[in-house]
Image: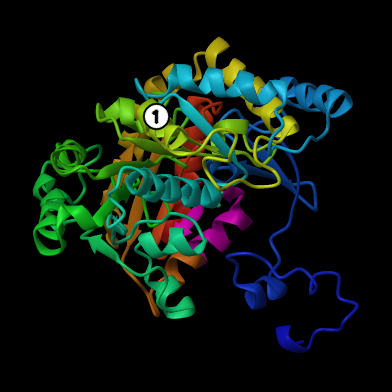
Amino acid sequence: MSATIRASNDPLIHQWMPFTANRQFLEQPRIIARAEGVYYYNTRGEKLLDGSSGLYCIPLGHGRRDIREAVTKQMEELDYAPPFQFGVPPAFRLATEIAQITPPGLNRILFSGSGSEAVESALKVAIQYHRVRGEGARQRFVGRERGYHGVNFGGWSVGGMVNNRKAFGLGLPGVVHMRHTKIPENQFEMGEGTHGANLADDLQRFVDLYGADTIAACIVEPIAGSTGILVPPKGYLQRLRDICTRHGILLIFDEVITGFGRTGSAFAAETFGVTPDIMTMAKAISNGSIPMAAIAVREDIQQTILDAAPPSTVEFFHGYTYSAHPVACAAALATLKIYREENTFGRVRQLSPAFLEQIGALREIPFVTDTRGHGLLGAVDLEPQGAPGQRGFKVLCKAFEAGLVLRNAGDTIVLAPPFAATPDEISQMVSIMKETIIAN
Ligand SMILES: Cc1ncc(COP(=O)(O)O)c(C=O)c1O
């Protein structure tokens, strides 16, 4: 029966699935029923390796008891309180703990419920910071082609995904995009590419064209994740930093994927030795257990915004019903405790070289056109077959049948193993990925 005329009592038709080929899914459902450690189980009870750490959000593996217990305890103690004009103890504790691992100076933490919300928060802080300093003409944002900053209007506008523009139109005015950093000169280089630091000079060109006094912020993912793991060229991020500093432009790092260990330190800012002014984080903050996100803001930026408002008034007109949700905070606190106690980020540094070597070795497959990676993020580009993205999607579907959950970004296949995976489990993931690629 065609997907569009399925019976109304079909148990699958009522959920409109996000970022999913809904019609294809109804023909070939991929249902995950249970998870434990680095494995999922389908409805037939068959095991699947979690090669994408959930959606980059479950580095510790599924079902961690400490997190579950912390969540239960918090539910019993305080399930919810309004976050506007009231505070909850776990939120203050969590902000303090996050401020201890963010780069120096980025120690004011504003919570939200998703990466998309964190991005909106960051963009709004940037605008308001400039306005209260009498630089209200700084309204433009500079993003980057192939950037992904979530689904809300600000986020997709600064992002550089073509599909958003096709589907939703113009987006935020005053946004311009630098070129992306995937260039042929760095083909098959794992880690930071040798070439391309000069691509950061696109930002300088926007300064020259529009005037620095019209630009509020430049936002990039240190490693572009959702469009296929674009690792920055050596020196690129520092060059962006220098241009921003020279022209009073705020630099925002979107660390929704790279935050909490993915590159081997707490944040990619630390890994690459470049400090932004504002940073977003989400995903691994609570090991995927409860939606949670945050931004870390330079202390003086927050202070400037606070000082500009009359006493006893709301200084930053922004927040969500579920900002600083106590249960999400408890989940994040338990997660950060495990990261500390188990030296989780150190484990990434140990696992990374062998992982990247295995990903790099896939270049031997004739129709693999590039391999890239950093930390526990690896990507393989496939020569398209048919319409762009079809081959990548086919690999995702076939890998699922072969016992592996992975990600495809068009014809790029992405592997992002949980940090809790053993070297053997990581090798198994790469091996299933390889076999599936070869067969498709
Ligand atoms: C860099 C980046 N920013 C923002 C987002 C949006 O996060 P969310 O899906 O939690 O809204 C994502 C999601 O993948 C992301 O990778």
Residue 247 placement (x, y as % from top left): 15, 44
| Residue extending furthest toward the front | 310
Query: Is 300 one of the magenta-colored residues?
Result: no
Residue at image position (38%, 57%) is 227
Magenta part of the chain: 394-409
Residue 234 placement (x, y as % from top left): 16, 37
Residue at image position (43%, 44%) is 125
Would you call the spot at circle 1 few (<14 residues within 10 Å), some (14-19), or many (20 or more)?
many
- Residue 354 vs 82, above or below: the answer is above
Residue 191 placement (x, y as % from top left): 25, 37
**In this image, 106 relative to 58: left or right?**
left
Q: Which residue is mark 1?
A: 267
**Quadrant housing the C terminus:** bottom left
Residue at image position (29%, 42%) is 251
- Residue 108 vs 280, above or below: the answer is above
Q: Amino acid at mark 1?
A: Phe
